[in-house]
Each structure stands twice: as structure tokens, then as C-alpha cells.
Image (spheres, coloured by chain):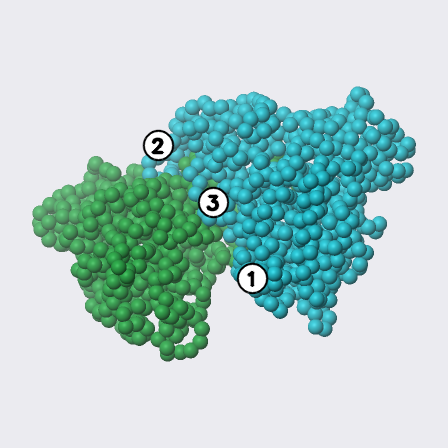
Chain colours: A cyan, B green
Amino acid sequence: MIETGRRSAGPIRLTDASAVRLRPATGALITGGFWAGRRAVNRDVCVPEGWDRLHEAGNFHNLELAAARVTGDYVNDLPFLDSDLYKWLEAVAWTLDDPDLGSGPADQLLRRLAESTELLGAVQQEDGYLNSHFQVRFPGERFVQLPWGHELYCAGHLIQAAVALHRSTGEDGLLAIGRRVADLAVRAFGTGPGQVDGVCGHPEIETALVELYRETGERSYLDLAVYFVDRRGHGLLGDGRFGRHYWQDHTPVRDTLTAEGHSVRQLYLLAGVADVYVETGDATLLAAVERVWSEMVATKTYLTGGIGSHHRDEAFGDPYELPNERSYCETCAAIASIHLSWRMLMITGEAKYADLLERTLYNGFLAGLSLDGKRYIYANPLQVRDGHVASGDDGDYVRVPWFRCACCPPNVMRLLASLEHYVLLSDEGSLALHQFMTGTYSAEVAGGEARLAVTTDYPWDGAVRIRVEDGPDAPWTLALRVPGWAEGAGLTVNGTAVGGGALDGWWRVERSWAAGDEVLLTLPLEPRLTAADPRLDVDRGCVALERGPLVYCLEGVDHDGHRLDDLVLAADQPLVSAAEDGELGPVVVVRATGAVRGRPAAAWWPYGSAAAVAAPAAEPAALTAVPYFTWGNRAEGAMRVWVPSA
Amino acid sequence: MIETGRRSAGPIRLTDASAVRLRPATGALITGGFWAGRRAVNRDVCVPEGWDRLHEAGNFHNLELAAARVTGDYVNDLPFLDSDLYKWLEAVAWTLDDPDLGSGPADQLLRRLAESTELLGAVQQEDGYLNSHFQVRFPGERFVQLPWGHELYCAGHLIQAAVALHRSTGEDGLLAIGRRVADLAVRAFGTGPGQVDGVCGHPEIETALVELYRETGERSYLDLAVYFVDRRGHGLLGDGRFGRHYWQDHTPVRDTLTAEGHSVRQLYLLAGVADVYVETGDATLLAAVERVWSEMVATKTYLTGGIGSHHRDEAFGDPYELPNERSYCETCAAIASIHLSWRMLMITGEAKYADLLERTLYNGFLAGLSLDGKRYIYANPLQVRDGHVASGDDGDYVRVPWFRCACCPPNVMRLLASLEHYVLLSDEGSLALHQFMTGTYSAEVAGGEARLAVTTDYPWDGAVRIRVEDGPDAPWTLALRVPGWAEGAGLTVNGTAVGGGALDGWWRVERSWAAGDEVLLTLPLEPRLTAADPRLDVDRGCVALERGPLVYCLEGVDHDGHRLDDLVLAADQPLVSAAEDGELGPVVVVRATGAVRGRPAAAWWPYGSAAAVAAPAAEPAALTAVPYFTWGNRAEGAMRVWVPSA
């Protein structure tokens, strides 16, 4: 049990030389409220069940095959099954930090961890190579199937798990395995004689190598990350069936203007580029990330923070191509976006990154996990039509226990298990609270460590209470992020209103803080109607309901007997919030006034003059909107975020 | 040379017992006007170049491999390459009917036909089996890879080519080969002992077998078609990666309520079901086709007549899911839709089928071929964004000379080459002119054959002149289709206006016609603004420009310096038609008044309050719309059919 925060550093531990404005908290612990609930589900359901799923899906079997402990065929034809285990191991690492884990479950996780590490050690070859898919299906082949082979992608996830376990448990068994994998890559890749000059079809190892460098101080890992960033975009991977953008090999990183291709690959790469910038200070890299992020957010991001418009190649669409029924919005892409936003927030200190992080976390990401923690969804649509027909995609719009391509579930687990690190950052003069989660958080400021206790029912309630628990005597600044939507936010210190308001998204209060000082930030949570940039054709004439950081949606199950396609929202009528505690658990729903549109007279052809297609008189209807992250938990059926408005 | 029409029956030759309201013309010849131009390109460019493309793409090589005449590997991993050749052979058959072909080109086609027939005869095995993919790659395997193998699909196209060549040349060499293929299928498939109880993953053979029955009188071919229709929808193909709807195996045909799955498969199946209905009179089949057609047209069809909303599985979307940027609208699906509409028009006599046939022909289909006949497009989007990034699909939104999966080009060729059959139908008392193409057309009515000469500049001009060339003395009815959009159409007979107007889409004039009688149908071709059913979210707040049967679009190349995404059309301003003869050849363009919308102030995030996303004042702009079928012929770049309206 830890009293005031976490024992371990989180997914990012900077060096003294890291080029950032803000640094991770030194202690963080989520102790209650909304996210404690989601994290309890992760700890008690997702992570334990993950072990079973990984066995059922063949991930362990494949590794045992590679260790020559069993016989049979490699299960599944996807080459990256090892990475599912690695992400799960990373989730285990962070879960072990949870003071509410309990000793029984902790012992079980430690046994499973030891068992996994032992197996991986047995699979690893003399020179460090470790990949069940290649060892079983292509023995002796190494780094020759770079476009589709995912060898370095798997290696990256292994390294991240190893670093996480080293930080949370102090154990260095997996770290040693991970280092040997990394050392092999250092020897194998480069432009030197006998080396492979290439990059992986799926970026991921870049950010892992930077973190391994941070963890070990071994410079060659950073150098290899730099090499991979430099060599990408030179056509080393060939065209492939989806074009070079698919694997981010279409332009050198520094020349890239737009977010393109496979969205998870794009974002993992950008996170790695940001990490390389942080440790090298190469400003051309930072400029590239900022440029691509801005283009992506302005033209290729859904209201939920989700990204990816194409199912076929899991790719970004064109600018403003954001189809609601076919929004891909892979859960992993939301996670990758959160990774990137967090990095850019540290680098720049700009609140917009925390705004997008929050939006993605509460909506595009959280919708990926069922409320009971037992089912996942791969693609997160913003609309499911009445009469939807699943097209055979992995779970197509229905939550399922696991996927054939199971990248998302353990990715959800590792983010939830490490979420406390995504709350507070600091610089030498200030603590920057950018997310609002009940818990205790501490960071270094000039003069010593300052510690805060945060209490809030956010996102249901807009009051965020921050108590200074401890801190140096000298003045320091408490910087509270005020989200872009929070017009009219208020702040009191020890009951006295503070003026000034937010500047560039931060409300800063500098003073000599004393233990016991109480700050109350009040964020207005009136439901609001949101419209879209007029270039977003699919949302034209529609509004979305939002409340605080939450995007809302209509579900067929709440509108009995009506097709959602026939509903219209009356934008001039009041919206009413109502707290409920039913099948969805404690939530605030939003009620609106609307109408059921009649069916146009036009008989067989759905196009014609304005008069021909005009709907006849509408009947009034009461609309109920639920938080987007809760959709699809009660029943299959229609859903929509954007609602035609009258 | 034929004086008054075609020598051969077209793709459908009914039996005396066929259950139809209308029957194909006995003679048809397109002699001038719009379609003569498109057909000349087909005859002089597409069909001759098709021979070269089929050699370059390996189709002949694969057959020569199967005939053991060459060595090497099967080219391309798709199993249906033979069918490309078969469709090309069918196009050759109909092209040989063209009186303007010329003796040199005719001789060349006949030589190529003979060469192909000889090769196919050499490939065909003792028992009739003929499939280069299976003979080369899976020797001895037959009808065991039904879900993906396309064996019966290929057989169907072979049979159609054989029937076409028999009709156009009288030659029965290919017909004999086709019959042996069909006879093998008759022996192999069924529920008897030793037979395969199964259906092909890709419907197509059904309609071919019915036509072979009509051509030969051999009842077992019809019986096999009935069997395939009956056995579909019982899960014989398994689930597959895209679900059972993908291959139309999710519900028995008679129980099907909605158009689902792979759109070409759905429509080829429906055409086959319609054919089986015609020869069996099984009304439950007709009811199913009518039901699915109605649902498809009302909720899953684009303004262009194109169908298919998903790239990933080439499938229909959900009801009202018709994304403009990702409209799949495969050229083959448009062709299949035309096949079905034609059949349903014969069966029911209802003009709506001719309306959709026309719309699909002039738009969704015709856009699939470049103006010069040298390039094809696979997917026909209704919108290409500024900044479009091709995602590696076969030619993704750019016209190319051929495809790896080259189903569309020879399909275009066979439809264009047989187009004269899609103009006139008849029953015992009337001639029904349902398409407007300059030429001569004849049909049987009570008392003898009646013959019409049609002269028109349609679709550029709305005057359609019909001269009675010959006919029996007894009264008969001339039925002229008046398209649904043609409000205010006029009709004169020998210069005298005729009243009454159209009823259910047909303007019928019954009289004792004399040779030399002149009828003038005048269809109003004022440009018009079209809106969409309000459930079609993506078109909300937009209008499309149409003129006569043509859908129009904006192209970036005509709006220099502006992004199409920024343009708005002023719906209250006049639209002006202008005839031009430039890079697009002779066309009528439509000019409209519009504006260039400013960019909203909202900085990094494209969503917000209505005020935040409202565009600042717009600058006036002149908009130019071109016929949709001409898009993408001048330059790559943005295009859109649906334009935001103010």
C-alpha cells in the first residue's frame, strides 16, 4: 500500500535533458469518482479475463510452439499475436501499482507475469530474436518481411511492457529480454555493412526505443529510433496494396504535411517522432508533428476524438471525409491519439492538446469497452442505421469478448491501468492539472514537492475541488485547464472568487499556498448543441448534444417504435439534464424536444424536387440522449450522434 | 449489311411461353446521335484494345497454360480471369452485328474469335470441365471451392458468350463448348447421389442457364437454374469473412426482404431469379424480386443509379447509407442493375424500370468509360474531395487502362455493343419505345411487323421524332415512355398536338398508323435542382443539378483556384444551359450562380456552437456543372454531385 501516490513512474520518464515545457507528476493516484469505477472494472474484469482470452486465442500456444514445448500449427494467420500478450503484460505492470488490487489478485498477476517471462525467455533465441510467428512459420527468416511482418512492432510492445514492469515491480527479468531484442535490432538495422536498411510496416518501436533509452541510459536505443524516423518515407517498404501512405512511407517525416494512411500507424509514428524530438531537440521534427496534428484535427477528426474514416485500409479519409455510419474510429487509434496529445502537451504546454486528450478519453476511447468490462468494440461508429447489416468486420458494431485481430482489448487495459499519469504535469514554477479525476497528485516545483487532493463527480458534475495537501513555502502557480467548451467557468480560493479567468486554456493562480488551501473550479455543464464546420458535409443540418466533456447520442432503445432516421431535434427548445441510475449505471441523460418526421410522398425514387421529397407534417416526440460511451450496452439497434435539427 | 435492323436476337430471346408483358424488338439498329458515338468508341477502341489487354494481363497465358501449350505460373491470383475473356467474346459477338464495323475489323474479330474458340476447345477436358485457374492451380479439384472459386460464375459468362456468338454469327463452335460446360454442371450439381449440393459464391450462371435453355430448348438447363435459385440462402457457402449476405446465401430467395451484401452478386442473382420466373411462372419469385428492387431503389441507390456503398466488401450499405466520397457504385453493378431493370420492364411493363434503366445508363454506367474509350473506372464516386488521397484500390478514382480485377471493362463493352436491344419492346397491340436513341426499331404487333425510325439529339435536346416506316393497317398503339422528371412533355402526331398525357409513365397513342406518320415527343430539358429524401443524411442541405436524364457535377478544373468544398449554390438563381464543344466533345453544360464560402474563425477544432462554426461572408462565384459521365476526363481533382445550397 502506498499512501500518497504511485510508487512507479508511468509510461514516460523524462531525462534531465528532455526538451519539454511540462513534466509528468512524481506521484499520482486515482482514488474515487468516475475513473476509479472504470479502472476497477479494468483491474477486476478486463485484466484477469485477458489472461484467459490470450490462452483461448492461441497467443500462448504460439509462443509454446516457438519454445518447442507443444506441437501443432501456429494459430491465426496474423503475424502480430505476440504483441497482444505484451500489451497485456504492460497492463499487468501498471495494475500492480494499484493499491486496491488486493494481495490475492496481486499474487495471481505476479505468478502469471513470472510464467509469461519464463516462457518468453525460453522462446528467445541466442542472439536475442523473439517472435513466435517467424520462429514457427518462417524459421530463420528475419527482418525480410518488413512491410507486413510486424517484427519490430512486436518488439516495441515487448520493450514497453518490459519498461513498465521494471518501473512498477523493479523486476528486470523481462527488461533483460527486451534489451536483448533491442540490442539485436541495434546490430541488425542501419546503413552499415551487413545491416538491413529498413523500417517496420507498422511504426511502434520508435517510441519504445526512446523509453528504453530513458530507462537504461543506453544511447544506441535512441540512435536506432532516430534512424527509423529518418529512414521512413523513402519507399523502403514498397507500394503495398494500399499505397505507401498505408505504412507511413510516402514522405519523409520532416516533409509530411497531412495525416494520411493507416491511422494507428500514423499516430504511433507521430508519438515516436515527438519522443525523438524530446530527446534530440531536433526542431524540424516538432514542426512536422505540429503540422500534421493540426491538419488531422481540423479536417479528419470526429466529434468524439475518434479518427479513421475507412474500413478497408483502416485509414484516414480525405479532408472533411468523416462518414458517420462508416467512421472507423478504431479504439487503438483513440489510444494512439491520447498518447500523442499527452506528449504534445508536455512538449508545448498548450491546453488544446489536453482538450483533445480529454475528449478522446471520454468518448472515442471509452466507448471501446463495455460497461461491464467484458466486451470490446473495434470500430466506433457515430451512427448505426435502423436495419444495420453487419458486414463481417471483426465484431462490426457489436461488442464482443475478443477479436481475431485483438489489438484493441489489451491496449484499452494498458491505458486504463496507467491513467493516473495523464492527470497532472508540472514545470519548475507550477502544477498543471489538466484532467479532473478524484485522487492525489504530486509534483516538483521550485522549493520542493507540492501535493494536491482532487475531489470531483466530474463528468457528471462540474465542481472540481482541489485541496493543497503539502508544498513548499515559496509561491508557486496552480494552473487549471479550462476546457474550450467551458464558457463561464468560475474559481474560488478558500471560498473567495478569483478573477482573471483562463488564458489560452489555463486558469493560473500564483500564491504562497498553505496546506489546507481549497480551490474550487466550477465548470458549467449545461447541455449544449454543437454544429460542425460547414465543409463537413455529413453533419450539415444536424446538431450533436454535448455536456461537459461528453458527447451524447440517441439510441433506438430509448425511442421505442420510432426509427432514429425519422427523428428531428428542435434546436430552439430547452435541453434538460437528468441524473439516472439504471441499466447504464449512474449517468446523466439529456432530454430534448423533437419530432418524428413523416415519410415523403415520393413513391419509388428517393430524389426529386424539394417539394417532392419534403416530409409531411411531423409528430412531436421526446428525445433522450445518453453519453456516447454507453451506447450499445443495452441492446443492439440504431444509434446516432448527429441529429437533424429543425 | 442489314438495312432495317439487327440480324440477331439480343441477349434475351424469349420463348412462346415466357411470362412477360413486353417482348424484345424483332429489329433494332442505332444509327446516329449520342449513343452511336459511344458505340463507335466501343467498336473502334474498347473491343480491339481489349484483345491486347487480355493478352498483357495474362488471361490468354493462363488458358494456354491449362492447354499445356506454354509453361510458367498462373498469372494473377484471382480465380475468375477466364470470365474477362468470355465477356469480351460476348462483346465481339454483338459488335459483329454492327453494320458500320467494316470488313477489315470484322475479319480481325472473326480471326480472334476463332483463335479463342480453338484455345478454349483445347483447354476443355474430356467431361466438359473448363477453368484455367483450377486446371492449373488445383488440378483435379472441381466444385470444392464454391465460396470463392467462381467456377460457375465463369461458366455462366462462357455460356452467355456462346449464346451471343450463336445468335450473331450462327457459329456453334463456342456454343458446343458452352453446352458441354453446362451439361457437366447439370450432371455434377443436385441433391442426387454423388452430386454436389451447392451454389456458386458469385451468382451469374442462373441467368446464363435460362438463356441457354431458350437458345437450345434443353430443359435441364432451366431445371439447373431453378435448382441454384432454390438452394441459395441455406448456408451452403458458410459464413465467409464478410458474412453470408456477401454471397447472397443469408436467406432463401423467396424470403428475402432487402438488398444486402455484395451488390453485383445481389443483382446478378435477381436477374437470374427474374429469368427463372419468366420461364416457370413462379409468382413467389417475382414477388421477391419486386420487393428487393423496391427496397434497394428507395433506400440504397445513388442519384446516378449507382449502387454499393462499401469498398471493403463491395456491398450495399444500410438503408440511407449512401456516402458520396465512398460511393462504391461499381461499374459492373450499374450494368447488373440495367440487366435487372430491363427484365423487370419486360415482365411488368412498368415504366419505372425504364426510368431507372435510363438513369443508370447515362450516369452510373456511362461514367465507367472514359470519353476516348481508353480508360475505365471501377468505383464511381459522387464526390472526390480536394486533397483526395488514393488508398490503393484498383485505380481509386482515376481512370486507368485496365485493372488487376478487370471485370468491368469487358462488361462495359458487352453492354454498349448490345445496347440497341434496350430501346424498344412490344406486346401484341403496341410498340413501347422506352429509350430515346436515333435508329430504326421494329416489332411484331397484331397484323404484322411495325417499324419505326427515331431521330433525336437526346440527351442534349428534348425533341424525339418518330416516323412510322411500316406497319399493319389495323390500329395499334405507340407507347412512348415519359420519364418521371419530364413534367410538361408534349406530343404531336403529324404536327397536331395530342392530349391526354402520360399515364403511369407511358403516353399511348392508338390509331391506324400509316407509313410516313410522324410523331414528335418533346421532353422538357430545363436544368433542375434535385433534393434527396431527408433520411439521406449526406445530401442534407444540398442540391444536385440534373437536366433530362443526366446528372451533373462540379469539377475542380472548372472552378480555378477554389476548393469545391468551399462552394455554395444559390438555389433561387436561374440555371442556364449552354452547348459547348470543347475538351469534353459536344455537351451541354449548366451554369449556376453561387458563392465561395469563407473559412470559419474556429481555430483548431472544427466543431462548436452554430456561431463558432458559421462561415464568414461569402464571395459570389460562377459555377459550371458538367454531365457526370464526363467527370475525370480532363484532369484529376475534386468533383461533386451534391452541392450545398443557400
Mark 1, secondary structure of its residue: loop
Residue A601 image label: 2
Three-letter code, disc 3: Pro
Q: Residue at x 63, y 25 (%)?
A: A526
| B536 shown above or below B129 | above
Residue A303 image label: none
Q: What chain letter is assigned to the residue under label 2? A: A
| A44 shown above or below B37 | above
B471 or B190, which lies in front?
Answer: B190
Q: What chain letter is assigned to the residue under label 3? A: B
Residue, disc 3:
B323
Indicate left or right for A31 with A589 as reference. right
Residue A281 appears in the rendering: yes
* Percent of width and height locating residue B645: 49, 38
The verdict on a common chain for dots 3 and 2 is: no
Picture quadrant where residue B529 is located = top left
Q: CA distance from mark 1 to mark 2?
A: 66 Å
Residue, disc 1:
A71
Three-letter code, disc 2: Ala
Three-letter code, disc 1: Thr
Indicate left or right for B465 with A131 as reference. left
Q: What chain letter is assigned to the residue under label 1? A: A
Categorize mark 2 by other alpha carbons within 10 Å: few (<14), some (14-19), many (20+). Answer: some
The verdict on a common chain for dots 1 and 2 is: yes
Q: Residue at x 68, y 30 (%)?
A: A33
Label total for image = 3
Categorize mark 1 by other alpha carbons within 10 Å: few (<14), some (14-19), many (20+). Answer: few
| B176 shown above or below B449 | below
* Percent of width and height locating residue B626: 44, 50
B121 or B463, which lies in front?
Answer: B121
Q: Residue at x 29, y 44 (%)?
A: B254
Categorize mark 3 by other alpha carbons within 10 Å: few (<14), some (14-19), many (20+). Answer: many
